[in-house]
């Protein structure tokens, strides 16, 4: 019972206090090198283009997605804070 309440409080904290980020892949820029998929499992290939599995991520997922943005050789990935 107490564990259930603790989990609920953590969920509320996550929803209320943690920042959210939008993740996008510009399909016009993407050359399909798949580097992003090797550093973050939020990126998957759809044909010869990458796409994010989740377009909105939590602060906990930021580092992985930002690394995807950083390794993209054509700057097709953007990770921006949601306002
Ligand atoms: Fe495309 Fe850049 Fe990923 S080129 S496959 S978005 S690393």
Image: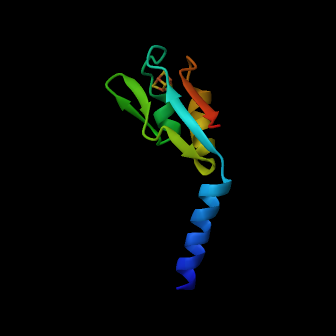
Q: Which quarter of the figure has residue 50? A: top left
Tell me if 24 is positioned left or right of 21 in this view: left
Q: Quadrant of the C terminus?
A: top right
Q: In the displayed orientation, state which residue is furthest to the bottom.
A: 1
Q: In the displayed orientation, state which residue is furthest to the right.
A: 17
Query: Residue 64 location, x and y as percent?
Result: 58, 42
Q: Which quarter of the figure has residue 2? A: bottom right
Q: Does residue 20 lie above or below 8 as drawn?
A: above
Query: Residue at 54% across / 34% down in the picture?
Result: 23
Count of labels in the image: 0
Q: Does residue 23 lie above or below 57 as drawn?
A: above
Query: Residue 46 location, x and y as percent?
Result: 34, 29
Query: Residue at 64% across / 62% down in the picture?
Result: 13
Tell me which colouring the rendered structure shows.
Answer: rainbow
Query: Residue 69 location, x and y as percent?
Result: 59, 29
Query: Residue at 58% across / 27% down in the picture?
Result: 78
Q: In the displayed orientation, state which residue is furthest to the left.
A: 47
Query: Residue at 59% across / 56% down in the picture?
Result: 15
Query: Residue 20 location, x and y as percent?
Result: 61, 44
């Amino acid at each position: 019972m107490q564990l259930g309440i603790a989990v609920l409080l953590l969920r509320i904290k996550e929803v209320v206090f943690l920042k959210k980020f939008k993740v996008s892949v510009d399909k016009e820029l993407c050359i399909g090198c798949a580097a992003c998929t090797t550093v973050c499992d939020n990126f998957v290939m759809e044909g010869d283009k990458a796409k994010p599995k989740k377009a909105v991520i939590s602060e906990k997922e930021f580092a992985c997605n930002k690394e995807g943005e950083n390794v993209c050789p054509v700057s097709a990935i953007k990770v921006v804070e949601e306002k």
